Image: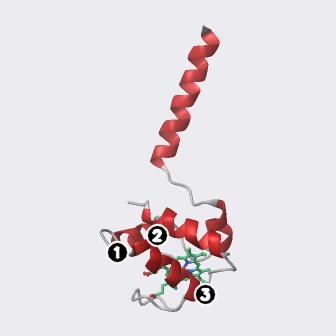
Amino acid sequence: MRTIVTALALIGTFAAGSALAVDMPKEGKTRCGACHSIEKKMVGPAWKDVAAKYAGNADAEKTLVANITKGGAFGWKLGNMPPKGMGATEPEIQSLAKFILTLK
Ligand code: HEC
């Protein structure tokens, strides 16, 4: 009985922790993390701000995949993003575009 209670308490802690802080996926840290964070503008815009820019845009995912793949400037006036960040593969770009659009 005691073990079960402890286990439940632990699960509760994990669930609460992950709800508070969204972590960048591993490929995001290695391919994009030098210039982007979720919450803060760095070299590039905060991914939360990108999500806000595309809120309600039906083509958001397609547009993001295309923009991340070709790089360049997208109106943030921060300079130019290198194509594919730091060598992201196509599947990584697709999953990162999806991830960015889940942010609020
Ligand atoms: C060398 C720095 C650098 C790296 C690495 C980088 N970015 Fe960027 N990114 C930028 C800059 C600078 C901008 C803003 C360009 C502008 O001013 O419009 C940007 C803009 C963006 C945007 C906004 C696109 C839009 O349509 O508004 C997204 C999304 C994005 N980056 C995703 C990524 C992802 C995903 C990766 C990793 C695969 C990545 N970036 C890697 C510098 C970088």
Q: Amino acid at mark 2?
A: Trp
Q: Secondary structure at mark 2?
A: helix
Residue that protrudes farthest toward the top in the picture: 1
Residue annotated with mark 2: 47
Q: How is the image coloured?
A: secondary structure
Q: Is residue 66 above or below residue 80?
A: above
For marks 1 and 3, the one nearer the N-term is 1
Mark 3, mark 2: which one is toward the viewer? 3
Q: Quadrant of the C terminus?
A: bottom left
On the question of residue 20 being in view, the answer is yes
Residue annotated with mark 1: 53
Q: Quick check: marks 1 and 3 in contact, CB under 8 Å?
A: no
Q: Is residue 7 above or below residue 73?
A: above
Q: Position of residue 91 (x, y in %)?
A: 63, 70
For marks 1 and 2, the one nearer the N-term is 2
Does the closest atom of ligand 1 sit within 8 Å of the Cβ of label 2?
yes
Residue annotated with mark 3: 83
